[in-house]
Image (tube, helix red, strand yellow):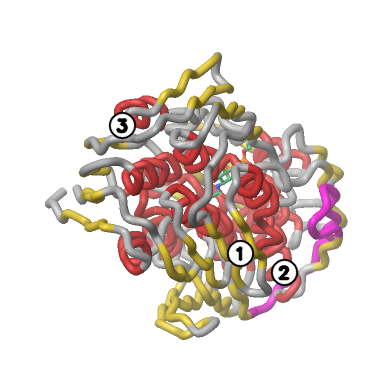
């Protein structure tokens, strides 16, 4: 299994191109199941999560073509998906266990083909990750749902019908799934307490381009009028706000200056304001963000993760890495996931001073320096937090279990090396 080796201490300066967003691309890819026509997606990141999802869709019978293309002056991937000859209406365990977000096939397949079988994914490192909101919403839309041998078997012989659904939590996954189910349902669906993450706006734009009728974009009430059929479209994945936020912290923690090309400041307001309060200068430009921590003192600050536009849980671990070397104390409260402090013991092995209180809060007291160590994390964002700690630590840090990083950070070492990091991948047989 590959490892990442970092020798800490370099100041990072330069430009980093922000890739297409993983969490936007995953539901967009599954939206291709809604039509027999071709769906072309531009700016798709080269990540293992996308490769896993593509292999599931190929198994189901989709035709997928891939090409390298210049998008916004940078080389990226364009995929074309065509679901005109679906052979399998089942997402087997072997695919789902590798990639939880394969649950995005549920809504589109059920609404178009009136039947789907989907292996329940089970828990994961950051929490139980239930699917009750997805399933109860589909039931409200007329589906009959049975759980058998670890699989959800959902049927709607007459097709799904519109419903008035009130989510108990503003779930991103359920909002995408139920949106995709509702666009081909009979009648009008209203979702209250919908999630408002930018990735959902990106999905709504594609669905509308395919002929769907949706109103309420960027609000917590979405109204969808079902149509008989959707058609092909070409659509671009938005820039990854979590990748942009992660590299913003790389600039801050190394006291450097990085321009995040193609990043969308509007999608990152809470993290950018937090960085400013910590002493970092932030300049928002039309198509980039400049993060400047040169000669700055970084101070501790409190964060509370919340649904968008609140502070993103997916940047909590990376901010915590920055707090470990800030002046003074910081309080981190995690309100979305019940088990998202797995990076804490590893950061402490590098010399950080962090105390966890209960399940949801951690106090970080800044230390003068971290020291390199072999570390490993159990999830994607926590792994990046360890990379950040390695960038500032004295000596050598080896980050194990690199497959987590490969799920969500395109060309990680290349991007960091280009701005001055001493980082390399150590290839090892699996
Ligand atoms: C998505 C993101 C993930 C991010 C999370 C929150 C993707 C592929 N993943 O995950 O990176 O951390 O949003 O921003 O986009 N919940 C239920 N029942 C459900 C569904 C969710 O109780 O049926 C709860 C979850 O346990 C969690 C909260 O709702 O406490 C938010 O989860 P959700 O927004 O669904 O997260 P994901 O879509 O899985």
Coordinates of residue 56 in the picture (x, y in percent): 42, 58
Q: Which residue is mark 3?
A: 350
Compare marks 1 and 2 and give the one earlier in the sequence: 1
**Closest to the observer, 170 or 156:** 170
The vertical placement of 14 against 384, above or below, is: below
* Crowd rating for badge 2 (residues with CA inside 10 Å; few <14, some 14–19, many 20+): some
Residue at 76% in and 74% down: 211
**SS assignment for the magenta stretch, majority:** loop
Is residue 138 visible to us here?
A: no
Q: Which residues are magenta?
A: 216-233
Residue found farthest to the top: 358
CA distance for labels 1 and 2: 11 Å
Coordinates of residue 165 in the picture (x, y in percent): 82, 41
Left or right: 176, with 211 as reference point: left
SS for tag 1?
A: helix
Numbered disc total: 3
Displayed quadrant of residue 235: bottom right
Coordinates of residue 350 in the picture (x, y in percent): 31, 31
Q: Is mark 2 within 8 Å of ligand 1?
A: no
Q: Which residue is mark 1?
A: 31
Quarter of the picture for ligand 1? top right
Left or right: 312, with 379 as reference point: right
Compare marks 3 and 2 and give the one earlier in the sequence: 2
Is residue 371 visible to us here?
A: yes
Residue at 25% in and 38% down: 372
- The mark lying in front, picked from 3 and 1, is 3
């Amino acid at each position: 299994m590959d490892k990442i080796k970092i020798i800490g201490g370099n100041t990072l300066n330069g430009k980093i191109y922000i890739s297409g967003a993983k969490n936007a691309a995953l539901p967009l890819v599954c939206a291709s199941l809604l039509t027999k026509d071709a769906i072309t997606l531009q700016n798709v990141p080269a990540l293992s999560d996308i490769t896993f999802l593509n292999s599931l869709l190929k198994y189901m019978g989709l035709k997928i073509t891939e090409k390298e293309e210049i998008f916004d002056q940078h080389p990226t991937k364009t995929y074309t998906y065509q679901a005109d000859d679906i052979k399998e209406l089942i997402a087997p365990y072997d695919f789902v266990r590798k990639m939880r977000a394969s649950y995005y096939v549920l809504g589109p397949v059920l609404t178009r083909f009136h039947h789907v079988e989907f292996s329940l994914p089970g828990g994961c490192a950051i929490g139980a990750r239930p699917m009750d909101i997805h399933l109860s919403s589909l039931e409200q839309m007329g589906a009959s749902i049975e759980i058998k041998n670890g699989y959800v078997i959902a049927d709607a012989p007459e097709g799904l019908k519109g419903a008035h659904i009130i989510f108990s939590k503003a779930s991103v996954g359920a909002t995408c799934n139920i949106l995709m189910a509702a666009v081909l349902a009979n009648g009008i669906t209203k979702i209250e307490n919908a999630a408002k993450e930018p990735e959902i706006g990106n999905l709504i734009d594609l669905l509308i381009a395919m002929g769907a009728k949706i109103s309420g974009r960027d609000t917590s009430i979405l109204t969808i009028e079902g149509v008989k059929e959707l058609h092909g479209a070409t659509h671009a994945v938005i820039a990854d706000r979590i990748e942009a936020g992660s590299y913003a912290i790389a600039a801050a923690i190394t006291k450097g200056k990085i321009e995040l090309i193609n990043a969308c400041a509007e999608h990152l307001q809470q993290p950018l304001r937090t960085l400013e309060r910590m002493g970092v200068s932030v300049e928002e430009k039309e198509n980039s963000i400049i993060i400047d921590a040169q000669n700055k003192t970084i101070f501790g600050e409190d964060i509370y993760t919340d649904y968008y536009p609140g502070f993103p849980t997916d940047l909590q671990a990376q901010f915590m890495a920055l707090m470990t070397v800030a002046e003074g104390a910081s309080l981190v409260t995690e309100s979305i996931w019940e088990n998202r402090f797995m990076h804490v013991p590893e950061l402490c092995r590098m010399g950080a001073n962090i105390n966890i209180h209960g399940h949801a809060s951690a106090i970080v007291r800044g230390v003068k320096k971290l020291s390199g160590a072999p570390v490993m994390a159990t999830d994607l964002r926590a792994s990046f937090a360890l990379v950040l700690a390695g960038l500032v630590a004295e000596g050598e840090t080896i980050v194990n279990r690199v497959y987590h990083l490969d799920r969500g950070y395109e060309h990680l070492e290349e991007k960091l090396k280009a701005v001055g990091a001493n980082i390399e991948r150590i290839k090892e047989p699996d």
